[in-house]
Image: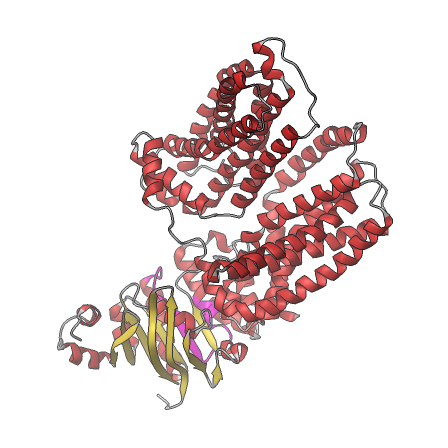
Amino acid sequence: MHQLRLIAGAWLLEGGRWARENLYALLVLGPLVLGMTYFGVGRMVRDAAWSPTEAQTLVAGVLAAACLVALSLSRASVEVYHVRRPEWVLDALPVTLGAQLWAALARRAAHACAVGAVALVLRWLARGEFGVEVFASAALLVCVLASGEVLSALVWVRWSHRRGARRALAVAASVAACALTAGELLASVVRPGGLTVSSRTAALVCGALMAVAQAVVAFVLHARWRAADSEFAKRLGARERWGALVERFAKRVCGGKEELAAQLARDLRLVLRGFSSAVYAAAGVGVLLTLLLVALLLGDVLAEGTAEGFGSTTWLPSVLAVKFVCVMVSASLASLVPVLVAHQEPHLWLERSVGLKGEDAWRAKLYLARVLTAPAAVATWVAGVLCGAVPAAYALPLLAECAWLWWLVSTAAGGLAFEMPAQPGLALILVLCAALAAGGLTAFLWPIGLAIYGFAVQPLCMRGAMRAEMHMKGFEI
Amino acid sequence: MSEESLLIVEEVTKRYGETLAVDAVSLRVAAGEVYALLGANGAGKSTLIRMMTGLAEPDAGGVNVCGDDMRRRPLAAKRRVGYLPEELYFYQRLTGREYLRLVAGLKGAQESRVSEEVEFFELSAVEGKWVGGYSLGMRKKLGLAAAFVGEPRVLILDEPLNGLDVEMMRKLRLRVESERDAGRAFIISSHVMSFVERVADRAGVMRAGRFVAEGSPADLRRLAGMPDEPFEDVFFHLARNDEV
C-alpha cells in the first residue's frame, strides 16, 4: 500500500503539473467544446423525433465499449509493462507485482473516468434523471473498463509473444466479455428512460461480477506472465513483415523523391506495425461504417428515391449514403495522421539534424493521408455497386465522386498534420471536423468541393507547409 | 576483497527468437570487488545486466544476490541492488529531488540519503527543477544518485560515464573505489577503457553471448600479449580476435 501511495503520488504530482501547463486547453477549449456540445448535440438529442430502441442502444453501447477496449490495448500494455516510461524503475526496485498491477489499474481507471463522465453528460443532455442507480452504473462502467483493458492488454501481449489460435481466441474473448458488460452499463447510463428493470439489474450484477472476475484473472495472469512477457512487450511491433514492398510502393507514390519516399515508407511501416492502438480503432471504425453502409443499402431504412434525369442520380438516397460513408471512413483513417505526428515528436531530432525541409515533412504526411484513406473510396464504392443500390449507369460517375471526396478529405487531413503536433487530442478533433465538413458538403454537391478546394484547402495547405517548417525549426506551435 | 560472493550468476542463457543473446554465462562477484563487463555492441552485456537486475528472466540458469535468488525472492534480491541503466526514462514533470525521494521510498531507504546523494552528484542547483529540463549530464547524475540511494550492496552501472564531465568522472571513480573498500560489489559496463583499467579488479570480455576472456586487467594484457599497448587495443584484440 505504501508503494502504491508513492507511485500514485508521483503520478498525481506530474498530472497536476501537466494540467497547469495545459490550462488554456482545459479552461478555454474545454468549456468551448462542452458549450458547443450542449447547444448542438444536446439540442439534436432532445428534439429528435426518433429515439433508439433498447436493443439499438445496447448494440451501440457494446460497439462503443469494444472500440474503447481495442483503442486502449497498446496504451494499457505500455502502462502494465512500463514500455519506455519512467515507471521502468519499478521493475528494478523492490516493488511488489501487486503494487505494479494496482498502479496500472488505477491509471486505467483514471482514463475510464472520462468515459463515465461523458456518459453522464450525455444522459444529462438527453434530460435523463439521476439517481443512485445511475451513478452506480457509471462507477461500475469505470471498474469494468479499467479491469477489462488491463486484462485484455495482458492477454494481447501474451498472444503477440507466443501466438497460437487459442491465445488469439482468448484476446477476442476477453475484449468481447468486457465490451458486452461495459456496453450494457454504458447503455443503462446513457439511455434517459433507463433500461427495463430486468436489464438494469442484469447490467449491475454482471458489471460487479465482471469487474471482480477480470481483476482477479488479471492479477493471476500478471503474476504468472510478467517475467516472461515484460521484455517482449518492449520489443512489440519490432518485426519486419512488409520490407522492400513498402519502400518500392513509397518511391512510386512519391515520384522517386528520396526524402519523401523514406519518410512515407517509415510512416507506413509504423502504421502497419500498429504504432498505437489508434490504428486498430481507426481501421475498426472504418470496417464498421462500411458494414453499416451495406446494412443500409440492403435494408429498407433508406427512402426510395427516383432520379429525374442522369444528373440528379447523385442525390438518390443510396448514392448519398455511399458518398457520406466514404467521407466518414476516409476521415476515420485520416485521423491517424495527427496521432502519428505526435508519436514521432520525440524522434524529430533526426529530421532536424539532416536538415529536412518543413515542406517535405508536411508533404510526406499529406501523401500518407492519401495512401491511408485510399481504401475508403474503393471499399465504399465497391459496397455500393455490389449491393445493387446504385444504378449501373451511375457506377463510374460515383467512382469519380468517391475519388474526389477521398482527394478532398485526405488533402484537408494531411494539410492539418502539423497544426497541433504536441496536442494529438485537439489535432484529432480539428482534423475530423475539417475533413467531415469539407467532405460532407462536397458529398451533397460535388462542385462545392471545387470552391472549398480553391478557397480553403489550398491556403490551408500553404499554412500547413509553413507550420511544418516552423515545427522543424523547433518553434513551439 | 572478501571471499563472500555478493552476486552469483550461474549458467544463464537468454534467447530472443533465433538469436542467442547470452549463452550459459557464469560469473561471481565478491564483496569489495569491481567487475568490468566488456564487449562490442550486441555482445550480450546489456542482456546479462538486465538478467542480473531482474528486468529480464533467464531462459535457463539463475541469478543470486546476497543469498537471495532473483527468481524465487525477487524483492529481497532487488533490495540489495542499485542499478543505473544505459537508457534513462524519468518523470518529466517531477523535480530531481522528488524523483530521488520516490526511489528512496520504494527502496525503503532513509530520506536523509537523498540529500547526501544530491550533494555528492552536484545536483543541488537543479534539484528543484523539473527533470524534463535537465541536460544529458544532469540526467546521468540523477540516475547515478538513484542507483546509490539506499546503500545497496551490489551496484550495477551500465555506461556510467556517458555524458559526465571529466571532473565528475574522476569523482565517480573515487566514489566507486571508496564504496568497494567499504565492501560493496560493482558490475560496470563501459566503453571507456582507461576507466575500466584503473578501477576494475577483474574484467570479462564478452563476444556473441559468451565470455572469451576473463581476469584482472593485467591478466588480460598478458593473455593478449600486449603489455605496453593502450588497454583499448587489448580490448579490441580480445573482443575481435577469433583465436582468443
What residue span does the magenta drawing correspond to?
B144-165
Along the viewing direction, whichever of A140 and A296 lies nearer the viewer: A296
Residue found at x 41% / y 77%: B60
Per the image, is A319 magenta?
Answer: no
Horizontal side, residue A233 vs residue A31: left or right:
left
Residue A421 screen position, x and y as percent: 49, 38
Q: Position of residue A457 (x, y in %)?
A: 50, 21
Q: Is residue A264 above or below residue B228?
A: above
Residue B212 at what x, y percent from top left? 24, 76
| Quadrant in the picture for the N terminus of chain A | bottom right
From this viewpoint, is residue A115 visible? Answer: yes
Comparing A196 with A291, the one in front is A291
Left or right of A198 in this view: B229:
left
In the picture, residue B32 is in which quadrant? Answer: bottom left
Q: Is residue B105 visible?
A: no
Residue at position x 79%, y 38% in the image: A53
Quadrant in the rendering for residue B225:
bottom left
Extreme-bottom residue of the structure: B3
Residue A339 on image: x %, y %: 51, 41
